[in-house]
Amino acid sequence: MLSMTDLPGSPAASTPLAADPLTRAVLEIDEYTAGLGWNQPARLFALVDTAQLRAQEPSLAAQLGIDDSSTASLTPVEQDEIPAGVPLDEFLATIAWPDAVVGCALTVERLMLPPAAEASEPAGMDEAQLAEWVAGHPDRQEVRMTVAVLRDGRRESALRLREKDSATEVLTGSGLVPGLADALAATFES
């Protein structure tokens, strides 16, 4: 497991500044995944308290390059790949986090339609037909969503449109992707 702050060419220095640690973590993950390019699989991250990690797991912190000069209060740690062919909601339902994980985040790419286009959606389509209709719609937009939740219920999201693929064009907010945030929050329920 590696923290993105410790990968070569780390985006941490270029990540836009944010006052809230959760927003900073979401933007750091967004910038990391942006550096990997588009058409990537979904990626899951554990969020750990950086100071606690240094104190309780000094060798792991050292391996991740986290030392006393680290200013981030949350460290994202990428998890193993999400299994291909398993629906995301089914996969998330299998996750249980250890107590040291204070939150989690997920990055996923999807096609979206503007509200006006959604209003013209033909009735009675199943999931596969709907996906095909959206993929063929001229107003579709590719979007990367990064959603994070903490055990205490706080949430944050970042949305990056492929057509505006720039760190200065990333939209953030706590309620941007409520369904995905709910699914992530459920991973902390016993």
Image: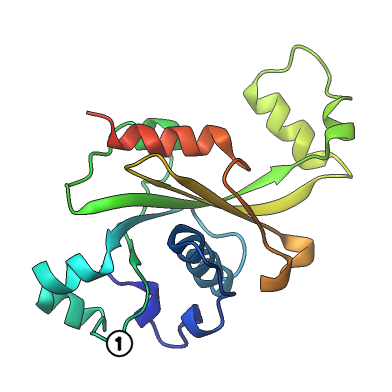
Residue 14, position as x, y percentages in the image = 56, 82
> Is any atom of residue 86 visible in this view?
no
> Residue 146 occupies which quadrant of the picture?
bottom right
Most extreme residue toward the top is 124
In the depicted structure, whether residue 156 falls above or below residue 117: below
| Quadrant of the rendering where the C terminus is positioned | top left
Q: Residues within 10 Å of mark 1 (few under 14, many from 20)?
A: few
Task: Give the labeled residue for mark 1.
Answer: 69
Q: Residue at x 77, y 36 (%)?
A: 134
Q: Residue at x 78, y 32 (%)?
A: 133
Q: Residue at x 73, y 66 (%)?
A: 169
Residue type for callout 1: Ser
Residue 81, position as x, y percentages in the image = 35, 55
> Residue 127 occupies which quadrant of the picture?
top right
Q: Residue at x 89, y 33 (%)?
A: 116
Residue 32, position as x, y percentages in the image = 50, 71
In the depicted structure, whether residue 33 falls above or below residue 85: below
Most extreme residue toward the front is 19
> Is any atom of residue 25 visible in this view?
yes
98 to the left or right of 93: left
